[in-house]
């Protein structure tokens, strides 16, 4: 039988035929597609024709298209719907892909062609986008070690292969810990929990195959439990398990893995002539240097820490009023913060959830995109990789733009967190293709699914990433959509969150799931006024993670990352009742791959811009001129220009940190 992964897809919009694809298809398709990609590269490198932009750079852009198709399907299902066979394949594919990547950048004939074009770049009469693609291609080769020789070259290949293995193992260990642990709740433990949380816990119990409601380590379950459960003993048990992910001992323990990853990254940087991995990694980002990153983080840390200490004193008094002596602990903070929010803002998050249904929030994200950019969304009835997935065709003025897929519910087979990816990126060359974009979240199931305000923000955040793909309008796929500097990529996503705070958006879409009535204006106002509530806590837990990430990669790799983590936090003066948002053994942003290594700060770097960017909508949140400028200068441009140039074209200047502090309620 033919392998559907290696066939042309005669499906609507050439979507992968998920109903025909079986796990047994992946390995043979991967092996064949990998060999085809190798052949593409050999033909480019060994051709007799003199190097040109078309026969080298554009040819590289078009190479490996079959491999890209196979991997787009595989990594989609491996991340969002894993199983033992897919995990096994991940472990096998990772080193092979690393070896292939090293073969490409280590191909001396190919690099000579790229280098000759780079040396002659001023004489090639390239468009701005072509010149950018040439620069990025040359830089990719050099930073991958293309100029290395002999033993150094061989060692680089070994390092990259081993890092691929370790990143995969880190992710799979974390998934195993998250999937295995759960805590059953008896009727007494349920008594004071809100209905939405009880329903979600019962649904999770059914998924686990037990009769009792359960709390799992999914953020959409454990965080509300920490907010609303009056059982301090159970809160502590849940929090300690959540905090211990990746450090539970045995085969799934990630601590030794993180130490080896850090050693290999430092060696990789030194082979390329950099003092540290942070110096290597940040060279191509907007921040450029570790010093600029630290400066930003510390400007935010000091006011955030001061606010958190004030808040901790208030929460401690509340706890002691309940007859609990001693210090406020991390499993106490969210519970007493929720009680404080109710007391000071008369806002009970449980009262919000009936108005924030998943379907309504999806409609809100779509509705805002329609008003800002004229996009329209029509449901598609197509086969997808899991029954929970939904798909829409995206059009504008009747013209097909893209396919958007949403996979919103938590399950044991899905890694934690939320993310956006493109199974196919936008491009015009070598052929015109619309993107296929996926948002993956981990919301608790329910009938209907009810979101907290933070969940709704996550949905808008990931859809902001999706818009970066949907509105992309460049020639080459490798610089389309979110193919930008790491500390620029979060700008569109964090900017889009602002529209969730627009009253008319909530008035339209925040409707009670039973009555259909709009959220009462009084409740809506309370929610918006409380938007900055507990920002000291949220900022401290984030900045602590970003500073530890930076400390790991600035100098010699630590022998014991857990000791380095503790030393870094103590030096910063970390409040005792707050922990890092992502402790080292489950810091997937940093250790599942290179994506956010030395780059977790980027959310805050982008927030400096997003606070300023929303201010561009001076005539109102649906200012047509501002929306057009945002699309023209940022959302449509992908990585086709330097991010500082793109932002400056949009706003006329780069912003300072003041708008961020004010937006978080940490400055007057």
Image (tube, rainbow, N blue to C red):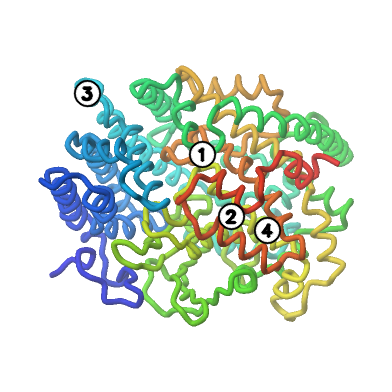
- Whether residue 442 is visible here, answered yes or no, is no
Residue at disc 4, secondary structure:
helix
Q: In the rendered image, which residue does mark 1 sit on? A: 245
Corner quadrant of residue 311: top right
In the rendered structure, the answer to whether residue 446 lies left or right of residue 589 reads right
Q: Nearer the viewer, mark 1 or mark 2?
A: 2
Q: In the rendered image, which residue does mark 3 sit on? A: 149
Q: Measuring 65% from the left and 70% from the top, which residue is drawn there?
A: 357
What's the distance in space between the residues labelled 3 and 2, CA to CA? 41 Å
In the rendered structure, the answer to whether residue 221 lies left or right of residue 426 reads right
Q: Residues within 10 Å of mark 2 (few under 14, many from 20)?
A: many
Q: Nearer the viewer, mark 2 or mark 4?
A: 2
Residue at disc 2, secondary structure:
helix
Which numbered disc flags the more N-terminal residue, 1 or 4? 4
Query: Is 456 above or below relative to 14?
Result: above
What's the distance in space between the residues labelled 1 and 3, CA to CA? 41 Å
Residue at disc 1, secondary structure:
loop
C-beta proximity under 8 Å, tags 3 and 4: no
- Whether residue 48 is visible here, answered yes or no, is yes
Q: Residues within 10 Å of mark 1 (few under 14, many from 20)?
A: many
Which numbered disc flags the more N-terminal residue, 1 or 2? 1
C-beta proximity under 8 Å, tags 3 and 2: no
Position of residue 203 measured from the top left corner of the image (x, y, whole percent) = 56, 64
Q: Nearer the viewer, mark 3 or mark 4?
A: 3
Which numbered disc flags the more N-terminal residue, 3 or 2? 3
Q: Nearer the viewer, mark 1 or mark 3?
A: 3
**In this view of the protein, which residue sits in the foreground, 200 or 617?**
617
Q: In the rendered image, which residue does mark 2 sit on? A: 492
Q: In the rendered image, which residue does mark 4 sit on? A: 187
Which numbered disc flags the more N-terminal residue, 3 or 4? 3
């Amino acid at each position: 039988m033919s392998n559907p992964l290696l066939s042309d897809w005669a499906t609507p919009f050439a979507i992968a035929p998920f109903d025909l694809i079986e796990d047994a298809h992946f390995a043979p398709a991967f092996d064949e597609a990998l060999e085809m990609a190798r052949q593409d590269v050999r033909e480019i490198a060994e051709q007799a024709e003199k190097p040109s932009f078309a026969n080298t750079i554009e040819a590289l852009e078009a190479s490996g298209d079959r491999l890209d198709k196979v991997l787009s399907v595989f990594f989609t299902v491996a991340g969002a719907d894993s199983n033992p066979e897919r995990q096994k394949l991940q472990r096998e594919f990772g080193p092979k892909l690393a070896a292939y990547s090293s073969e490409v950048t280590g191909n001396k004939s190919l690099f000579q062609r790229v280098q000759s074009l780079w040396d002659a770049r001023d004489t090639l009469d390239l468009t701005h986008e072509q010149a950018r693609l040439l620069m990025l291609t040359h830089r990719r080769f050099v930073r991958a070690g293309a100029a290395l020789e002999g033993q150094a070259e061989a060692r680089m290949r070994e390092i990259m292969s081993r890092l691929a293995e370790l990143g995969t193992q880190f992710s799979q260990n974390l998934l195993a810990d998250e999937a295995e642990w759960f805590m059953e709740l008896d009727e007494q433990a349920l008594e004071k929990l809100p209905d939405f949380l009880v329903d979600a816990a019962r649904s999770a119990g059914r998924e686990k195959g037990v009769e009792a409601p359960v709390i799992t380590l999914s953020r959409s379950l454990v965080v509300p439990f920490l907010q609303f459960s009056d059982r301090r003993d159970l809160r502590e048990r849940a929090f300690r398990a959540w905090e211990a992910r990746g450090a539970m001992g045995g085969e799934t323990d990630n601590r030794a893995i993180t130490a080896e990853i850090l050693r290999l990254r430092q060696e990789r940087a030194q082979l390329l002539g950099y003092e540290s991995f942070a110096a290597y990694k940040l060279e191509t980002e907007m921040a450029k240097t570790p010093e600029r990153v630290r400066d930003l983080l510390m400007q935010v840390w000091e006011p955030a820490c001061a606010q958190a200490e004030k808040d901790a004193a208030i929460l401690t008094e509340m706890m002691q009023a309940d007859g609990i002596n001693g210090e406020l602990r991390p499993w106490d903070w969210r519970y007493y913060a929720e009680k404080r929010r109710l007391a000071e803002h008369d806002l009970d998050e449980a009262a919000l959830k009936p108005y924030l249904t998943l379907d309504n929030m999806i409609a809100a994200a779509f509705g805002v995109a329609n008003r800002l950019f004229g996009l329209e969304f029509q449901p598609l009835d197509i086969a997808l990789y899991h029954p929970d997935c939904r798909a829409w065709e995206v059009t504008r003025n009747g013209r097909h733009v893209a396919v958007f897929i949403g996979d919103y519910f938590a399950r044991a087979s899905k890694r934690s967190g939320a993310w956006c990816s493109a199974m196919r990126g936008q491009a015009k060359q070598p052929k015109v293709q619309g993107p296929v974009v996926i948002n993956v979240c981990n919301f608790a199931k329910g009938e209907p699914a009810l979101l907290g305000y933070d969940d709704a923000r996550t949905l808008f955040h990931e859809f902001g990433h999706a818009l970066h793909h949907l509105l992309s309008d460049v020639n080459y796929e490798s610089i389309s959509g979110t193919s930008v500097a790491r500390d620029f990529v979060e700008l569109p996503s964090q900017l889009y969150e602002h529209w969730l705070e627009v009253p008319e958006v909530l008035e339209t879409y925040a409707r009670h799931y039973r009555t259909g009535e709009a959220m009462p204006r009084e409740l809506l106002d309370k929610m918006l006024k409380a938007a900055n509530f507990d920002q000291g806590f949220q900022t401290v837990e984030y900045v602590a993670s970003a500073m530890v990430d930076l400390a790991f990669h600035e100098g010699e790799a630590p022998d014991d990352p857990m000791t380095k983590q503790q030393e870094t936090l103590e030096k910063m003066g970390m409040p005792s009742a707050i922990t890092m948002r992502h402790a080292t053994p489950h810091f997937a942003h940093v250790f599942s791959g290179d994506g956010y290594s030395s780059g977790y700060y980027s959310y805050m770097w982008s927030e400096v811009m997003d606070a300023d960017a929303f201010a561009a909508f001076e005539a109102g949140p649906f200012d047509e001129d501002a929306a057009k400028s945002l699309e023209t200068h940022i959302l449509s441009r992908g990585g086709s220009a330097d991010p500082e140039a793109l932002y400056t074209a949009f706003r006329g200047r780069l912003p300072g940190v003041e708008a961020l502090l004010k937006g978080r309620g940490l400055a007057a």
